Image (tube, rainbow, N blue to C red):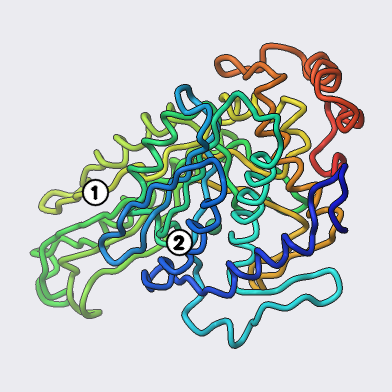
Amino acid sequence: MTATSDNPFDSGSILDGIRRWVEIETPTEAPEQVNKLADLVTQGYRDLPASVERIAGKSGCGDHLVARSSWGQNAPGILVLSHLDTVHPMGFIERLPFKIEGDTAFGPGIYDMKGGAYLAYHAFRQICADSARSPLGVTQLYVSDEEIGSPTSRALIEAEGRKAKYVLVTEPARDGGKIVTGRKGVARFEVFIRGVPSHAGTRPEDGRSAIRELGNVIQALEAMNDLTRGVTVNVGVVRGGTKPNVIAEEAYAEVDMRVPSIADSDELVPKILGLKSRTDGVSVRVTGELNRPPYEKGNAGAALYEQPITNRCTFRRSSRGRGCCIGCTRRCDERRKPRPLRSRRAVRRWRDRARAGLVLRPPQGSQATHPPGRSDRAFAAASGARYRHARAGQSPRSLR
Ligand SMILES: [Zn+2]
């Protein structure tokens, strides 16, 4: 679909832009490549009312970019989180060159997340092109190290996130275009057990088996599973011992725990860290922590979703970051549906959402302060005919 005076979005130029981003390969471990893309992204803001701050990469990672709209920066605004790095190794583009087949586009990282990141950038261009601007400032943060857990960008993300009223993340949506409004927290632990070795045949009474104690520890951990509460504890790796005829001196385990709320984490993390040996002469030491806090359902993010504006949006809000879908499918082949209508709508949704501060009161506290129906009508009245299809309670899918 080409741009018209009514609709400024042209799917061809959007796909061209995505292609330019995709064709610069950006494995996290190739900072010079990530920086090449960062150069291109920076150039893209030159003619816009925005400033770009570049934070030099460290620890072998590329640079991070913070692009701020020239307006609305004196109050909490909208933060859009994206990452420029991809999981694909350098040269993968030879195997998966950018191409469009039918209504599907292919390319390394097009799904996670260059397509979403570019759409957000393009939507920002459109906001800038219009005379009407949202009262909320827009800040777009592009980090270089998400695929390895954001070790060098976490502090920056947290700092920018704290300043923002809304945080939108341009990671791919879930199957069916579903928006994520909650995510469990993740904790990781290591268990170190030390016993007393001895010959299992001739001096069993002298030994204290670390492996046997590991059995106790595993049972204690497994007993913490509570699927009705949404708590999962998994002992995913175990090691120990040396020979069949030796009572094991050492044993080791790695544990993954997922919790839906901070309250669960506050209860269970100390329990796991405090696991004690049940065998005299055997020590149990546990290290670890909650390394990704839960993004609790029912918080302000879920309330934001209840706003009609977000009901039509393909982005998810998340503390870690996840959001865009224009019909993207599986990550394994990194393909994306470039259907013009969908693309156009996806970008327009984002732009309109960014403008939502004009007409919607943000949710207060952890719950929406008004029924969706009322805000929907108020929003539609204030923002014109293009929202006339909005209906409270419709799923994002149905509103596409
Ligand atoms: Zn991603």
- Looking at the picture, how far across and down is residue 343, in whole percent? 78, 54
> In screen coordinates, is 5 left or right of 274?
right
Number of numbered discs present? 2
At x 70% / y 32%, what residue is drawn? 131
> In screen coordinates, is 15 left or right of 299?
right
Sequence-wise first label, 1 or 2: 2
Local secondary structure at mark 2: helix
- The quarter in which the N terminus is drawn is bottom right
Q: Which mark is residue 287?
A: 1
According to the picture, the residue beneath numbered tag 2 turns out to be 38
Give the residue type at disc 2: Ala
- Looking at the picture, how far across and down is residue 377, in whole percent? 85, 17
Query: Which quarter holds ligand 1?
Result: bottom right
- Tell me the distance, in whole angstroms, between the alpha carbons under discs 1 and 2: 37 Å
- The quarter in which the C terminus is drawn is top right
Local secondary structure at mark 1: strand
- Looking at the picture, how far across and down is residue 309, in whole percent? 74, 30
At x 64% / y 82%, what residue is drawn? 96
Q: Is residue 231 visible in the rendered structure shown here? A: no
Q: Is mark 2 within 8 Å of ligand 1?
A: no
Give the residue type at disc 1: Thr
- Looking at the picture, how far across and down is residue 161, in whole percent? 44, 34
